[in-house]
Image: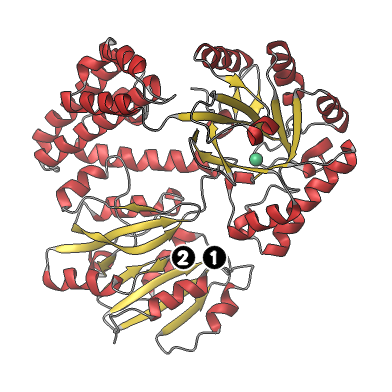
């Protein structure tokens, strides 16, 4: 019998699963079995898996789709090896993955889980490391999941009855490891042993909201372990205001500090968390939110001496350390990272924002937009059209700073609310229209039961005004990087042609749905002759770089 089973649940991962399985078969550690458990994929995932003829691969197919958490439990029930290594059908393991993690478990009987650093890839690559020691990792779990693609002892499953919880989806991993860490220790290797595929920021996704709620439930589970004595009010504060990434006032900062003290005191009476580790992690949380707030409030338009002075004379400077202050001073003296301009990404303009957080994130009020425009004008920014950007001297060191306003998807309210406002202020703007949403031919699935699409007539009126540029945004709003090149070409060029027919002139500009793309996407856009392509992230445009695609700043109203 093998020593370890690699447990790989799969569901519709046809484009990725071959690479994932290859990366397992190429492990330097040889004594394993690979259990692929397919949850009724509707693409050809299972055919691709069957094309492998390695005796170490065991394939199980569910009779009906049971969801990821239950699929993992079914997999665990089929395993009788000493260890389990967990990976997904769209991840890639480095060759030393099993060797390094099993090496730790073999030599440290007190450690039940060994996990490692990983690289996120997709549109951009970032290295991620979780705290190395168990005690630090445990404190980190109060904020985020710090275990990924680990190898762990099957005894956790057999002796402690730990299971993946279907009601925790899509945070079932976080919940599972939170429960495991109550009964065993973890060690996080500080090296990259995994490449983890990001299906990048799904801004138009309703899943987002469920994810956030489920993560909150695990954070609470961790807090309750720290102490069962927190009141309902304190728990709500912990998952709400305390977790907000930016500090709203000095009072807010003081409240956060007071709550950290309370957590430290509660822990002293229960003792589940190591005092030093908990203190370090809470300090880190305060520092990160404080620094983020300072950058956002004072330096979001670039570092300069006047901005440094404004920061220094604010009350908030008293709360930061001398080291951080001198760092900001140095940056301001060197005027590093000066942004030449920003392309704003907006979606809907509404008088009353929704309660649903995922929808709310896409909505801004006319007042807020007007206030932002005024603020930027005061700071010396010029508002330009997307055509102007193409001729704007981005590489010229004396270039004036600009903002270009864009709206994605093609909402009816871009005509009824955004247009009158921007017309009054004389501000140019671009609307990227998903051609399938025009006249509500197909619904926007992130706003179920609502008809929000722009009409042909409204579109023509916008197009007739020189202030407005119309761009394309595909036909059906897919994740382009999940499509093959021919499907991508059709999505892009059909949306262009549809708009060109409606408006009677060529369309030159394109926005990537969800901001997603791969190298094929950009080649196709260039071949079709699209002048500018925008993505959904990347922040401001900086000096001396040319862009294809152009980055944007996601304008979220607080
Ligand atoms: Zn969109």
Q: In the visual, does 409 lie left or right of 517?
A: right
Q: Residue at x 58, y 50 (%)?
A: 516
Q: Residue at x 34, y 43 (%)?
A: 218
Residue hosting label 1: 11
Q: Is residue 446 visible?
A: yes
Q: Residue at x 38, y 23 (%)?
A: 299
Question: Could you say which is closer to the camera, residue 245 or residue 544?
Answer: 544
Q: Quadrant of ligand 1?
A: top right
Element assignment for label 2: helix
Question: Could you say which is closer to the camera, residue 465 or residue 256?
Answer: 465
Tell me where residue 125 appears, x and y as whole percent: 42, 54
Residue 495 vs 5, above or below: the answer is above
Number of on-image labels: 2
Residue hosting label 2: 71
Q: Quadrant of residue 187?
A: bottom left
Q: Residues within 10 Å of mark 2 (few under 14, many from 20)?
A: many
**Within 8 Å: ligand 1 and the Cβ of disc 1?**
no
Q: In the visual, does 478 lie left or right of 11?
A: right
Tell me where residue 471 appears, x and y as whole percent: 74, 38
| Marks 2/1: CA–CA distance | 10 Å
Q: Residues within 10 Å of mark 1 (few under 14, many from 20)?
A: many
């Amino acid at each position: 019998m093998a020593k370890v089973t690699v447990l790989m649940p799969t569901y519709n991962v046809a484009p990725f699963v071959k690479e994932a399985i290859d990366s397992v078969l190429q492990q330097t550690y040889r004594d394993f079995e690979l259990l692929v458990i397919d949850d009724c994929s509707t693409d050809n995932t299972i055919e691709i898996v069957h094309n492998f003829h390695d005796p170490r691969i065991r394939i199980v197919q569910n009779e009906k789709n049971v969801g990821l958490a239950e699929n993992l439990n079914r997999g665990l029930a089929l395993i009788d090896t000493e260890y389990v290594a967990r990976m997904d059908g769209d991840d890639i393991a480095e060759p030393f993955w099993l060797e390094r993690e099993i090496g730790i478990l073999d030599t440290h009987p007190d450690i039940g889980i060994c996990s490692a650093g990983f690289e996120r890839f997709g549109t951009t690559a970032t290295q991620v490391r979780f705290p190395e020691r168990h005690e630090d990792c445990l404190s980190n779990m109060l904020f985020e999941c710090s275990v990924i693609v680990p190898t762990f002892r099957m005894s956790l499953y057999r002796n402690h009855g730990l299971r993946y919880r279907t009601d925790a989806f899509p945070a079932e991993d976080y919940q599972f490891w939170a429960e495991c860490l109550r009964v065993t220790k973890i060690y996080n290797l500080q090296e990259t042993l995994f490449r983890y595929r990001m299906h990048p920021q799904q801004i138009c996704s309703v899943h987002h909201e469920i994810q956030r709620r489920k993560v909150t439930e695990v954070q609470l589970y961790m807090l309750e372990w720290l102490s069962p004595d927190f009141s309902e009010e304190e728990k709500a504060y912990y998952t709400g205001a305390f977790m907000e990434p930016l500090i709203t006032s000095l009072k807010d900062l003081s409240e956060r500090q007071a709550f950290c003290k309370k957590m430290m005191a509660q822990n002293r009476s229960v003792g589940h968390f190591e005092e030093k580790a908990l203190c370090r992690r809470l300090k880190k949380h305060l520092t990160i939110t404080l620094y983020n707030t300072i950058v956002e409030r004072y330096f979001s338009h670039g570092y300069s001496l006047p901005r440094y002075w404004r920061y220094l004379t604010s009350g908030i400077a008293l709360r930061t350390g001398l080291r951080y202050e001198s760092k900001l001073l140095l940056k301001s003296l060197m005027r590093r990272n000066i942004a030449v301009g920003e392309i704003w990404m907006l979606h809907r303009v509404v008088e009353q924002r929704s309660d649903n957080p995922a929808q709310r994130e896409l909505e801004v009020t006319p007042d807020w937009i007007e206030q932002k425009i005024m603020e930027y004008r005061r700071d010396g920014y010029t508002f330009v059209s997307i055509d102007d950007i193409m001729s704007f001297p981005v590489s010229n060191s004396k270039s004036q700073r600009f903002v270009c306003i864009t709206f994605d998807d093609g909402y009816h309210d871009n005509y009824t609310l955004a247009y009158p406002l921007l017309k009054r202020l004389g501000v140019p703007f671009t609307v990227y229209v998903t051609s399938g949403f025009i006249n509500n031919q197909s619904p926007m699935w992130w706003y179920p039961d609502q008809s929000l699409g722009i009409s042909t007539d409204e579109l023509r009126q916008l197009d007739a005004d020189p202030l407005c540029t119309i761009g394309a945004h595909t036909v059906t709003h897919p994740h382009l990087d999940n499509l093959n090149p021919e499907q991508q070409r059709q999505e892009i060029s059909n949306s262009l042609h549809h708009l060109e027919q409606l408006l009677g002139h060529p369309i030159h500009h394109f926005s990537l749905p969800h901001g997603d793309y791969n190298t094929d996407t950009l080649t196709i856009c260039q071949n079709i002759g699209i002048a500018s392509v925008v993505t959904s992230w990347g922040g401001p445009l900086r000096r001396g770089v040319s862009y294809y695609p152009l980055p944007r700043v996601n304008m979220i109203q607080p």
